[in-house]
C-alpha cells in the first residue's frame, strides 16, 4: 500500500526515524540524566527523585546486580511491583546491567507467577513486600536464585520511609506473612552496590531489552522479545510526533497506568525519561478519589490512560473542578476510546482525548491521531513514522481503500518474536517482517485507520488482554467441571466482561464455589463476571467449542 497517510502528517513530522542515533536504551537514559540532571524525574506520594537521584541509585543497584549476585548480560530479571519510586530504579538499573527485564503483574496468582518466571527463565526478581507472599509460594519451583525485596516507602527518605512502611505493615496490615530464604532488602543491595565499581556493560540495539508477556494474537501467554532497537524506535516515533507541542524538560506527566504494562512502560516510564518530564506515579489508580486529590496538587500537562480510567475520573466528585489549564496532551490506548467518554473529556478539560493503537508486539505504538485534531473522530490515527500498514484479506491479498480486512504492521518497533515459541512466532510474523495483528480494520483515503472488529477471541478487560483458552483450562481443572466455554460481552464499566458457560460433572457445584476457585487461580480481571451452567456446549464436528454461538446467545442476557 502506498503511504497515503504521509499527506495527513502534521508539519515537521518526518517520514522516517533513525534509531541508530542511540546505541541502546541505556545510552538514551544516560544522555537524558546528564541533560536533565537537576530536574525532578519521578514523584510518588509527594516525594521526588531527581534525574540525578535516578542516575545514582540505578548505578548503585546495577553495580550490586553485576557484582554480588554476579548477573551477566542477557540474564532475565523480573520486576514485580506497582507504580512506586523503586520501579524506575529497578528498571533502569537492570538495563544498565545488560539484563533482560521481565515485567510481572503484582496481582498474579501463584500459578500465573510460576508460569511466567519459568517460561522466561528469570534468575532474579525485585518484588514489593506486599506481594512477596505470592512469590514465597512458588519461588522454590522456579529458577529464581536472587530475591530483592522492597517496601513502598523505601525511597521516601527518613523519617517518612520509616513511618509509611510501619503504617502499611503494622497498622493497615497490608503485608501478608511470608518467608523467602536468602532474600535481601533493596536498601542493603544499594549499600553494597555503592561500595562497588560499576563497569558499563556494552550493549547494541539488537540486544533484547524486555520479555513483555502477552497472549499475543493467539493462545497461551508468551514473552514478546522487544529489543533495544524496538523500544528506541518507538520512543523516537512518539518524540517526533509530539515535539511540536511538548517541550523537553518542562512537562508533568500523570502515570496512572501500571508501568509493568507495555503502554505505560513506553508512554510513561521511557518517554518521560526521553523528554525530561516529571512523572507523577499513581500507585493505586482504582482509588479514584485519591487520584483526584493527587491531581489537585499538580499542574499536569500530559495524561496517558485508557477509556475506563477516563470514564471513572469523569464520574468522580471534584474532577470537574481541577485546573486543566496546563493540560496539552491526553492519550487514550489499550482499548477503544468511546465517543461519549471522549466528548465528555473534551467538555470538562478543554483538551481532545487522542486515540492511539498498538500491541505488546509493537512496543506498543502503531498509530496515533495528530495532536491538532479538534475532536474525537473514531479513528485510531495515522501510522507512525517508519511504519507501514496494510489491510489484508484472509488469503493475504491487499484490500482497497475503505475495505475491511486484517491489519498488518511492519516497522522498526515490531518485536523479534516470541521467546521460545517458534511456532507461535511463525503464525504471527511473516518472513519479510509483517505482523498479523488479528484486528479487522479499514483505512480511508487520507490514511486514517479505523478498527472495525477483532478476528481473535481475545477479551479486552479494562485495557488488559484476557484469553479464553487460559480461563477455560483453569475451569476445566476443577474436579466438578466437565467443560467450559468463555466469551466476552460488552460492559459499560470495563469495556468487556468475562462470561463463563460451564457444564458440570458434579451437580453439587455452585457458582459461589467456582468463583472462589477462579479467584484463587487467576488474577481478578480474568475471573468471570458471570457463570452460566448449561447441559451442553455448542461444538463443531471435530469437538471445538463454538464461541461465536455462545456470544450470539448470551450477548444481551447480562446487560
Image: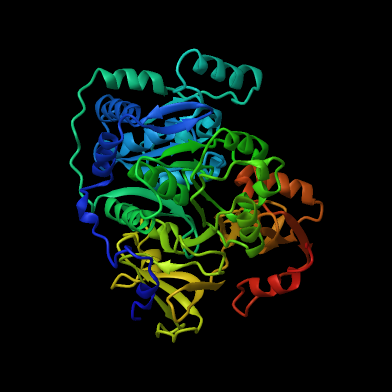
Q: Is residue 187 left or right of residue 405?
A: left
Q: In this view, does 491 lie to the left or right of 326?
A: right
Question: Which residue of the protein is positioned furthest toward the front in this rendering?
Answer: 325
Question: Which residue of the protein is positioned furthest toward the right in this rendering?
Answer: 508
Residue 20: x percent and y percent? 20, 55
User: In this rendering, is residue 63 above or below 374?
Assistant: above
Residue occupying the point 50% across, 62% down: 219
Q: Which of 540 and 440 is in front in this view?
A: 440
**Can residue 182 be seen here?**
no
**Can residue 536 be seen here?**
yes
User: In this rendering, is residue 72 above or below 176?
Assistant: below
Q: Which of 321 and 136 is in front in this view?
A: 321
The image quadrant that residue 446 belongs to is bottom left
Residue occupying the point 46% across, 82% down: 394
Residue 54: x percent and y percent? 34, 30
Q: Is residue 554 left or right of residue 360?
A: right
Amino acid at each position: 500500500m502506498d503511504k497515503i497517510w504521509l499527506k495527513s502528517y502534521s508539519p515537521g513530522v518526518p517520514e522516517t526515524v533513525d534509531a541508530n542515533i542511540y546505541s541502546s536504551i541505556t545510552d538514551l537514559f544516560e544522555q537524558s540524566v546528564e541533560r536533565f540532571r537537576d530536574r525532578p524525574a519521578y514523584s510518588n506520594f509527594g516525594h521526588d527523585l531527581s534525574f540525578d537521584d535516578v542516575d545514582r541509585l540505578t548505578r548503585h543497584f546495577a553495580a550490586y546486580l553485576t557484582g554480588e549476585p554476579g548477573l551477566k548480560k542477557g540474564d532475565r530479571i523480573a520486576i514485580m511491583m506497582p507504580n512506586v519510586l523503586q520501579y524506575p530504579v529497578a528498571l533502569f538499573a537492570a538495563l544498565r546491567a545488560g539484563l533482560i527485564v521481565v515485567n510481572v503483574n503484582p496481582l498474579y496468582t501463584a500459578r500465573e507467577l510460576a508460569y511466567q518466571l519459568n517460561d522466561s527463565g528469570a534468575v532474579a526478581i525485585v518484588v514489593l513486600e506486599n506481594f512477596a507472599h505470592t512469590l514465597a509460594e512458588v519461588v522454590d519451583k522456579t529458577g529464581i536464585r536472587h530475591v530483592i525485596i522492597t517496601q513502598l516507602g523505601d525511597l521516601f527518605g527518613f523519617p517518612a520511609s520509616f513511618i509509611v512502611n510501619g503504617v502499611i505493615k503494622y497498622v493497615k496490615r497490608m503485608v501478608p506473612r511470608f518467608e523467602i530464604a536468602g532474600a535481601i532488602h533493596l536498601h542493603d543491595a544499594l549499600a553494597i552496590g555503592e561500595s562497588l565499581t560499576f563497569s558499563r556493560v556494552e550493549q547494541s540495539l539488537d540486544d533484547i531489552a524486555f520479555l513483555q508477556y502477552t497472549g499475543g494474537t493467539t493462545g497461551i501467554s508468551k514473552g514478546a522479545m522487544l529489543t533495544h532497537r524496538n523500544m528506541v524506535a518507538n520512543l523516537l516515533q512518539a518524540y517526533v510526533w509530539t515535539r511540536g507541542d511538548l517541550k523537553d524538560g518542562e512537562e508533568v506527566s500523570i502515570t496512572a497506568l501500571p508501568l509493568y504494562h507495555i503502554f505505560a512502560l513506553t508512554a510513561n516510564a521511557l518517554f518521560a525519561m526521553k523528554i525530561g518530564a516529571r512523572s507523577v506515579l499513581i500507585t493505586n489508580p482504582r482509588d479514584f478519589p485519591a487520584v483526584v486529590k493527587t491531581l489537585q496538587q499538580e499542574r499536569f500537562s500530559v495524561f496517558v490512560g485508557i477509556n475506563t480510567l477516563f470514564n471513572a475520573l469523569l464520574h468522580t466528585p471534584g474532577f470537574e473542578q481541577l485546573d486543566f489549564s496546563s493540560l496539552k496532551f491526553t492519550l487514550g490506548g489499550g482499548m477503544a476510546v468511546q465517543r461519549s467518554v471522549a466528548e465528555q473529556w473534551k467538555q470538562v478539560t478543554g483538551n481532545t482525548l487522542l486515540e492511539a493503537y498498538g500491541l505488546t508486539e509493537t512496543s506498543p505504538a502503531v498509530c496515533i491521531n495528530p495532536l491538532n485534531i479538534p475532536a474525537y473522530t473514531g479513528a485510531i490515527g495515522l501510522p507512525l513514522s517508519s511504519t507501514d500498514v496494510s489491510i489484508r484479506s484472509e488469503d493475504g491479498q491487499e484490500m482497497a481503500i475503505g475495505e475491511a480486512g486484517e491489519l498488518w504492521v511492519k516497522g522498526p518497533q515490531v518485536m523479534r518474536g516470541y521467546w521460545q515459541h517458534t511456532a507461535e512466532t511463525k503464525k504471527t510474523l511473516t518472513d519479510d517482517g509483517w505482523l498479523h495483528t488479528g484486528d479487522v480494520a479499514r483505512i480511508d483515503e487520507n490514511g486514517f485507520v479505523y478498527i472495525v472488529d477483532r478476528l481473535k477471541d481475545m477479551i479486552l478487560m479494562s485495557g488488559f488482554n484476557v484469553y479464553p483458552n487460559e480461563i477455560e483450562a483453569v475451569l476445566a481443572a476443577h474436579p466438578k467441571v466437565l467443560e467450559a466455554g468463555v466469551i466476552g460481552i460488552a460492559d459499560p464499566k470495563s469495556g468487556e466482561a468475562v462470561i463463563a458457560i460451564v457444564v458440570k460433572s458434579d451437580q453439587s457445584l455452585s457458582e459461589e464455589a467456582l468463583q472462589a476457585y477462579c479467584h484463587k487461580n487467576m488474577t481478578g480481571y480474568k475471573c468471570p463476571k458471570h457463570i452460566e451452567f448449561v447441559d451442553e456446549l455448542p461444538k463443531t464436528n471435530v469437538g471445538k467449542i463454538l464461541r461465536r454461538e455462545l456470544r450470539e446467545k448470551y450477548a444481551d442476557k447480562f446487560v
